[in-house]
Image (spheres, rainbow, N blue to C red):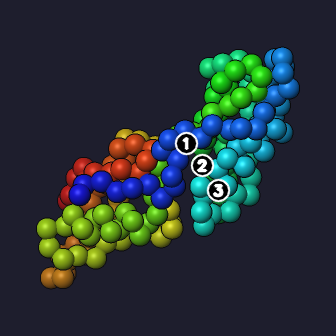
């Protein structure tokens, strides 16, 4: 299989039940927005500790208005898009990036090698990339041959493909 599943199960947008603004407000309340993002993503960031959520100060409370919030979780910086669904403060929260566990990326490279190999995709425990962005792994074969493998992220669900081998 040429694809790998995302560590985090947020390929389907999360819809916040929390209200981010009082009825009729012109802007979403920043503190409520931060809390809504934190409470929506904490359950899906299994194994990561959310230490900071920073949303923009001014987000219009009108259906379709959106902003990007920055989330810090276990040293990773994640970008979450928050979109107002109505003027009462309803919001939809979705990731803008794939978060892939290093071990899953290495398994993908190893499982797609033509010969038995060990794979190393760096020191970080997670790889965070936007769709279309590549990351490099090293494949070391049993005979000592080493190849660089360029893996490209297909979508925020963490599906990937090998785009180059050198």
Residue neighbourhood size for the residue with mark 2, other residues' Cα within 10 Å, grouped as few (<14), some (14–19), many (≥20):
some
Q: Which residue is mark 2?
A: 78
- The x and y percentages for residue 146 are 22, 72
Tell me the element at label 1: strand
Which numbered disc, 1 or 2, marks the residue that appears first in the sequence?
2
Residue 13 visible to an observer of this rendering = yes
Residue at (15, 82) in percent of width and height:
143
Residue at (18, 77) in percent of width and height:
116
Q: Which residue is mark 3?
A: 43
* Left or right position of 87 against 97: right
Above-or-below relation of 71 to 96: below
Tell me the element at label 2: strand
Which numbered disc, 1 or 3, marks the residue that appears first in the sequence?
3
Q: Nearer the viewer, residue 26 or 114?
A: 26
Q: Which residue is mark 1?
A: 95
Residue 121 visible to an observer of this rendering = no
> Closer to us: mark 1 or mark 2?
1
Residue neighbourhood size for the residue with mark 1, other residues' Cα within 10 Å, grouped as few (<14), some (14–19), many (≥20):
many
């Amino acid at each position: 299989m040429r694809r790998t599943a995302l560590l985090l199960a947020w390929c389907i947008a999360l819809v916040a039940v929390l209200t981010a603004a009082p009825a009729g407000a012109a802007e979403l309340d920043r503190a409520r927005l931060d809390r809504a993002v934190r409470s929506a993503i904490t359950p899906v960031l299994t194994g990561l500790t959310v230490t900071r959520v920073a949303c923009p100060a001014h987000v219009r409370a009108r259906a379709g208005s959106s902003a990007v919030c920055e989330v810090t979780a276990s040293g990773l910086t994640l970008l979450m898009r928050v979109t107002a669904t109505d003027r009462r403060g309803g919001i939809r929260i979705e990731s803008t990036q794939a978060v892939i566990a290093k071990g899953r990326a290495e398994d993908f490279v190893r499982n797609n090698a033509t010969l038995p190999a060990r794979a190393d995709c760096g020191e970080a425990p997670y790889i965070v990339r936007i769709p279309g962005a590549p990351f490099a792994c090293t494949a070391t074969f049993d005979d000592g041959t080493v190849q660089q493998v360029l893996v490209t992220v297909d979508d925020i669900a963490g599906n990937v493909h090998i785009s180059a081998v050198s």
